[in-house]
Amino acid sequence: MIRVGVIGAAGRMGATVCNAVAADPGLELVAVVDSGAPGSTTHGLTIASELRALADAKVDVAVDFTVAEASRVNLPWSCTAFTLWWEQPDSLKMIWMALRNHLQIAIV
């Protein structure tokens, strides 16, 4: 099961992403972050205001569905947090090794 965190979880599209993740049997929604709605809940999770919630939940994937200004802050944090993921299963290492020489920035 892939552990997913959503940044911008309280927004219209972020909530839609949360719903899609929660509905997929291969995914587990483990962290939700939105600085505009801390303390609210979605899918049994309390929305955090800090990106640290992603690391605390040991997410495998973080989906950032925020505005461009917020993404500029989130992207460097996510890249720095990649060092935490390096200790995860070999599949993540294989993905990183395949992409590191070809990838400059990926925003999905």
Image (cartoon, grey):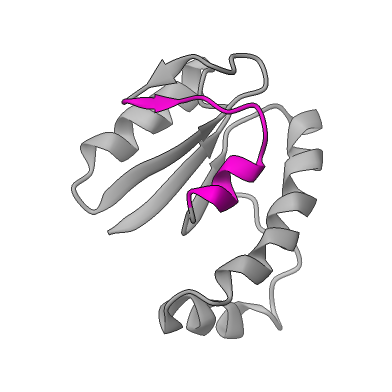
Number of marks drawn: 0
Q: Is residue 31 above or below residue 40?
A: below
**Is residue 28 located in the magenta-colored stretch of the structure?**
no
Give the image quarter of residue 38.
top right
Q: Is residue 91 above or below residue 4?
A: below
Q: Is residue 38 toward the left or the right of residue 88 in the image?
A: right
Seen at 41% across and 32% down, the residue is 17
Q: Nearer the viewer, residue 53 or 62?
A: 53
Q: As drawn, which residue projects farthest toward the left?
A: 25
- The residue under the point 34% across, 57% down is 2
Q: Position of residue 10 (x, y in %)?
A: 52, 18
Tell me if 102 is positioned left or right of 21 in this view.
right
Residue 96, picture quadrant: bottom right
Rendered view: 82 above or below 35: below
Quadrant where the N terminus is found in the figure: bottom left
Which stretch did the figure color magenta? 44-57
